Amino acid sequence: TSGERTAKAERMFELMDGFLKNDPLSLQKDILDHVEYTVARSRFSFDDFEAYQALSHCIRDRLIERWHDTQLHFKRKDPKRVYFLSLEYLMGRSLSNSIINLGIRDQCADALSQLGFEFEVLAEQEGDAALGNGGLARLSACQMDSLATMDFPAWGYGLRYQYGLFRQVILDGFQHEQPDYWLNFGNPWEIERVHVTYPVKFYGTVEEEILNGEKHQVWIPGEMVEAVAYDNPIPGYGTRNTITLRLWAAKPSNQHDMEAYNTGDYIDAVVNRQRAETISSILYPDDRSHQGKELRLKQQYFFVSASLQDIIRRFKDVHKDLNQFPDKVALQLNDTHPALAIPEVMRVLVDEEHLGWNKAFDIICKIFSFTTHTVLAEALEKIPVDLLESLLPRHLQIIYDINSFFMEELKKRIGLDYNRLSRMSIVEEGAVKSIRMANLSIFCSHTVNGVSKLHSELLQTRVFKDFYELWPEKFQYKTNGVTQRRWIVVSNPNLCALISKWLGTESWIRDIDLLMGLREYATDISLHQEWRMVRRVNKMRLAEYIEATSGLKVSLDAMFDVQMKRIHEYKRQLLNILGIIHRYDCIKNMAKDDRRKVVPRVCIIGGKAAPGYEMAKKIIKLCHAVAEKINNDSDVGDLLKLVFIPDYNVSVAELVIPGADLSQHISTAGHEASGTGSMKFLMNGCLLLATADGSTVEIIEEIGEDNMFLFGAKVHDVPTLREKGSTIKVPLQFARVVRMVRDGYFGFQDYFESLCNTVEGNNDYYLLGADFESYLEAQAAADKGFIDQEKWTRMSILSTAGSSRFSSDRTIQDYAEKTWGIEPCRCPL
Ligand code: NBX
């Protein structure tokens, strides 16, 4: 029997002293075994990449052990679980992170060096897993790390895109997109589960059936594809817990199109089958708009359907009564992208489990929580009804039913205020009738979370005001955070060692509040020296990278000033570039003697523009055109350099952030929901030059205005400034730098014209002109601060110390307590 078999296996395992060992010798043996048997190279001759592959498999084996134990432990304890539903994860590289979380970094480095390899070199062999666009996707990755580390019974669900976010290639200063076929060289970090598959259905019709004398709607689907699970183990730090990120890939189903085979058109039938795979083949690279594309909707439903089948199966393995579902399951919607989960759960409960509408809806409202990541009403997702009707006819009916119920409830509360009813309705009647996914998500979730305090205020007073007034208790916020494991321990090992030395413990890696202990030493001169030394080594590494990627040599004495994030008009990279032009112009017009007083700068900009976002692409080109002029001007020399670092991604961030002196987070107030890049810079002791937007407002509370360079209109000034439009007094310097671009000083006059138009007079929606003067003042303050290195170092230490509030551990603790109602479930060692 299987019970006997299990007992026998357990005995054998103990006899053989089963678990893998982590001393350098055992690691070496395992690495060499993988060279020979997994990579299939000779153990006497293999290169860096093959060594990376072997090492990864050796680490993967160790992850799998812990992962099995964790899953078994969860199964035995059966705690309430959270399921994190996100269409995007920016995991970056896994090797260093895994080794550090397993606590075997030194042992691995030893093992490798005895084999003649260097750990850092092997780690560089790994490509990024870039299954997401920007902040939202990296946040998911940070939160998975925290969930694992804090022992929460959590699962992440996502899509296994074959093509991740495009690679950005710059030719003549223009962005070109190249496909990121990241699976080309294999992926040791995933485990294909050929037996964990679910059918996902599309199209078809809805028919009425009579069951036990009652009318029922049944969906007769027209097409079917198969979802196959790929599991990515996520190890926690300082714990055995290793949780699962389960990504779905689409495969043709065997029942896909039986007819075609029967009619004999074999070739066509096979080609058709292949098309199923396109569902999970590509990540949409646009992080602002949604175009109502059928493929995107298919992706969303494919993801939701497979995940929910898996979740419900796991529940039913142990429990009979679906009424207990809310006691055991929390479903977290990462933005509205997975919101089809709401009608899908309804469909399963009503049509398949015959639970009855009211009971089912009651369950829905207890299990879903929703987090939104935007402030812009126009960025909210809407699905055209036509599209939904053809792809998911039954879901459309269910959404209509939810909406009728919603409208009835609303009328009880607000009467027949038709304007308001139509604003709040889940169905938007307009030129294109569509479904408002945010309204659906708010109505059906028990909690609506914003991602920073300011964001939450804006949701309550503007974007979702109508909802807030009626259900204030639903609205909460959880300020975003980032994981110190990735953003200090992995990416800045020297700073990590320094922090541990001064705090006298490594415990801050799990218990981030301890980081505040650094405040005590903020004026200690010997810490200052060591701090500056660490920072200088990081700058050296960054300078080497700049030289290797752009051929530009930069001075380590200059201030490294970085703005790296997706390119958006609201993030105002253009303000940065115009500021740089102004700096250049000033240097040019200075007497030679005065130039000695200029604080040298290396301005570093990086980020991807959505392929269809014309203005963002022009900003990238402008950056290159300006760089070309400045970097070749002998009057300027080392006083000013401008570099665009191409193909910004997680691993580039790991290299750049530790080397930055100053970083810019300069969105027009009221536009950045939170911002998480700033938190990574802060952790690494980089000073911020920022507007009071998103989470910066809370960073100010934490480290104080004096420890950063703050500027610009406040959120409540913005509407008035916009009203004033062209009557605002814009500084002469602003008009001058815009004119330089307009007049072709940097070439490409015609091409930049439309870009210049966006910041002039009434068009200046993002208020570059209005904020320019205070921006320059903040820049001047930064220059002044940089001269006083002692003061600067103190501010830098205080930045790191104050970053503890911005750890994703704190965010996750908040979610666990206040939104999901889950508790840690720690796997014994
Ligand atoms: O989410 C970002 C916000 O802009 C940041 O302020 C915030 O810090 C971060 C995490 O909460 N939003 C974001 O990254 N959105 C997307 O990437 C996106 C992707 C696909 C899409 C819409 C938005 N259809």
Image (cartoon, rainbow, N blue to C red):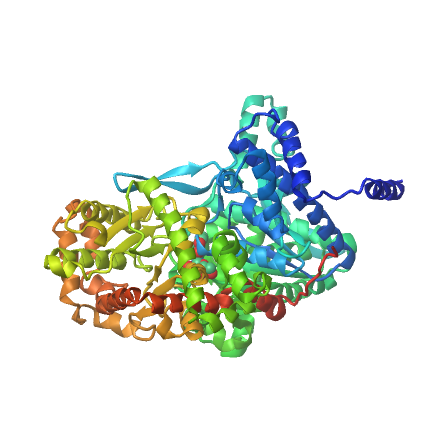
Q: Nearer the viewer, residue 110 or 82?
A: 110
Q: Quadrant of residue 685?
A: bottom left
Q: Residue at x 64, y 36 (%)?
A: 28
Q: Nearer the viewer, residue 228 or 648?
A: 648
Relative to residue 451, is residue 110 depicted above or below?
above
The quadrant in which the C terminus is found is: bottom right
- Name the spot of residue 43 as percent of width and height, x first: 62, 27
The quadrant in which the N terminus is found is: top right
- How many numbered marks appear? 0
Q: Residue at x 17, y 62 (%)?
A: 734
Relative to residue 229, is residue 528 depicted above or below?
below
The reply to whether residue 288 is visible in this rendering is: no
- Name the spot of residue 105 as percent of width and height, x first: 59, 48
- Name the spot of residue 574 as percent of width and height, x first: 26, 56
The reply to whether residue 511 is visible in this rendering is: yes
Q: Quadrant of residue 459?
A: bottom left
Q: Nearer the viewer, residue 332 or 562?
A: 562
Q: Nearer the viewer, residue 551 or 817?
A: 551
